[in-house]
Image (cartoon, coloured by chain):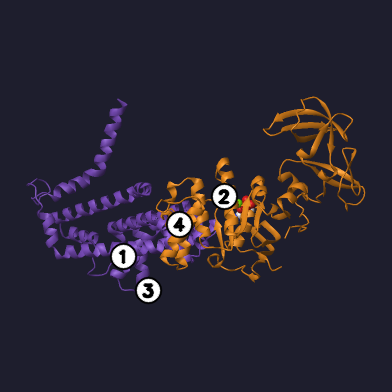
Amino acid sequence: MKKTVGRLYLTLVLIFLYAPIATLMVLSFNSSKSRAHWGGFTFEWYLGLISNEEIMDAFRTTLILAFLSAFIATVLGTAACTGMQFMRRRYRSIIMGITNIPMLNADIVTGVSLMLLFIAARVSMGFTTVLLSHITFNIPYVILSVMPRYRELNKSTYEAALDLGAGPVYAFFKVVLPDLMGAVLSGFLMSFTMSLDDFIITHFTQGPGFDTLSTKIYSEVKKGINPEIYALSTIMFLAVLILLFFVNYRPHLDKENVKK
Amino acid sequence: MSNKLIDLQNISKSFGGNLVLDELDLYIRENEFLTLLGPSGCGKTTTLRIIGGFETPDTGSVLFEGKDITNLAPDKREVNTVFQKYALFPHMTIAENIAFGLKIRKKSASYIKDKIRYALKLVNLDGYEKRMPDSLSGGQQQRIAIARAIVNEPKVLLLDEPLGALDLKLRQDMQYELIRLKNELGITFIYVTHDQEEALTMSDTIVVMNQGYIQQIGTPEQVYNEPENAFVADFIGDSNILPGIMIRDELVEILGARFDCVDKGFGENNPVDVVIRPEDIDLVSPGEGTIEGIVTDTIFKGVHYEMCVMSRGFEFIVHSTDYYPENIKVDLKVNPFDIQIMHKPESEDEKAVEIDERLP
Ligand SMILES: Nc1ncnc2c1ncn2[C@@H]1O[C@H](COP(=O)(O)OP(=O)(O)O)[C@@H](O)[C@H]1O
Ligand SMILES: [Mg+2]
């Protein structure tokens, strides 16, 4: 009895969580433009996406933006973690606290404040401002991912490298970084996902003529709902899902590699 | 003077207000096997890290062959360290681990290959080139760490409790390996341990430390037979440490009985500490010794019996190959040269006077 109630409850929760996305996916294959009735299965909307110049443009922008911002944030975040290793513990936890706050901050607040900052600094809005914003909100995710790994790292391997005549930079790249690589990649993937996923902050810092997929979807939806958007949203959902899968399963993959 | 390879002068170091080394003076000679011995937390690792360049002393200087290297980076020093936890590079093969320092020095590929083979042979691990560190046992990893250090032909090898994580049997084997290595390579070893037996077995010179002070420097025989204070006596092996009064030169009163001894220069009627090693006490029939007692406990220890003898309220530990059953009355006898007289410390952690009696 208890079991059935439990199962029922779980099913309800899952339906509640995934019904909207399931609806979206189903409609993206519906050959009828009506949302109310099923006109048969089709790939038409997906094919339409490929021939839609504007969407393909936004798609490329999104990928470039996600890659660049994740890459730069990963470099900066890893460097920050390295610096924090040399700090006193108290200062380190203060800095960790400060870097964690932006993740909890409402996106809209971050977006608006970045916009105000760019206006105040008279930077014209466009790719650069969006890129800077994405780097900003990605760095905490990299730190969050890399810092714990740093803490469990055997510090004496770094010292052993110095002892054997390596300069600090060589020792870092030859000895420390390979040990951190799993966490660094997780940080990169997480940032990449966050960047793909973001709408609000991009919305506030984008300039005219600049669109990522999410801002494109938003402006299309304002004009009128179009099944192509369902297809696009489905692709984005799946992309993020796959990325998240990799982020979460990386640690296990790492361990298996070590055993070989 | 000229064969002082490393000279630590007046080194002090504190961590966040906690004084770890207090005006330490120590030199290490070329080709010496010098051991820093002391209880955990006494500053041994810190001393080693100052020599290796991983810590900078607050005061004082480190001289290497007469040159001041106090502020020289670790990668520029002609010393190599074998770390307490091996610190092998986990993502590199054994060969790559050993080649690490040689590649930095831009040695030729054939030189590196020869060196790797030579070093693996030296530590009895031929053929392990392609293995990964975590496929090796603790003892093997330890030997690789040593191989990785010595291929660079350092003038000094620093070893921080290298055998601490190994089990007893392996530890004893490795002690002989290390002595053999030291003789084969002819380099200076600075060895850190809290294990007095290890120190006594391997060292030319032992530096006994406590709470950041050097308590005594000497050969294993000196620190064992002639401990300079109660701390050293207590730390190095079992011993009977009891208060006494120096009546005059070569005569000491212990527990109300007078013993002949060989020490001089402690004044007359001065309180002193007296050390008598358990194996230096002879048990004899009542009336034949200096002081009477009764055996309270006897255990067989393999080679000898360990007995407790209660005498005038003090419990002596006695090692003897002769068996005396419990509750039997005996007399205790000690040869004059087996009685070691020490100054009473004025305070708990009083710095011992360092008389350098090291053999050249
Ligand atoms: N980096 C450090 N920061 C703070 N305290 C330290 C540090 N290194 C050592 N200490 C302290 O210094 C004392 C001596 O340490 P150490 O030299 O490691 O002793 P040993 O090797 O003899 O056990 C200990 O009390 C230890 O806690
Ligand atoms: Mg230590």
Instruction: Give the colour of chain A.
Output: purple
Q: Which residue corresponds to mark 4?
A: B117
| Kind of element beneath mark 2 | helix
Residue B217: where, in percent of width, then height? Answer: 72, 55
The nearer-to-camera label among 3 and 4 is: 4
Q: Does dot 1 land on a helix, a strand or a loop?
A: helix
Mark 3 packing: few (<14 Cα in 10 Å), some, or many (20+)?
Answer: few
Q: Is mark 3 within 8 Å of ligand 1?
A: no
What numbered label is drawn on residue A121?
A: 3
Upstream in the sequence, badge 2 or badge 4?
Answer: 4
Report, in whole angstroms, how far the alpha carbon at label 4 lies from the one at label 1: 46 Å
| Same subunit: marks 3 and 4 | no
- For chain B, the rendered hue is orange
Q: Which sits earlier in the primary sequence, circle 3 or circle 1?
A: 1
Residue B301 is tagged as: none
Instruction: Point out residue A196 in the picture as x, y percentages from the top left corner.
Output: 27, 58
- Amino acid at circle 1: Leu
Q: CA distance from mark 3 to mark 1?
A: 23 Å
B99, A196: nearer the viewer? B99
Q: Residues within 10 Å of mark 2 (few under 14, many from 20)?
A: some
Residue A68 — which label? 1
Q: Nearer the viewer, mark 3 or mark 1?
A: 1
Mark 4, other Cα within 10 Å: few <14 / some 14–19 / many ≥20: some
Query: Which amino acid type corresponds to the residue marked 4 in the rendered image?
Result: Arg
What amino acid type should be assigned to the residue bearing mark 3? Ala
Residue hosting label 2? B177
* A112 in relation to B227, above or below: below
Q: Which label lies toward us, 3 or 2?
A: 2
Quarter placement of the N terminus of chain A = top left
Distance Cα–Cα, label 2 vs label 1: 54 Å
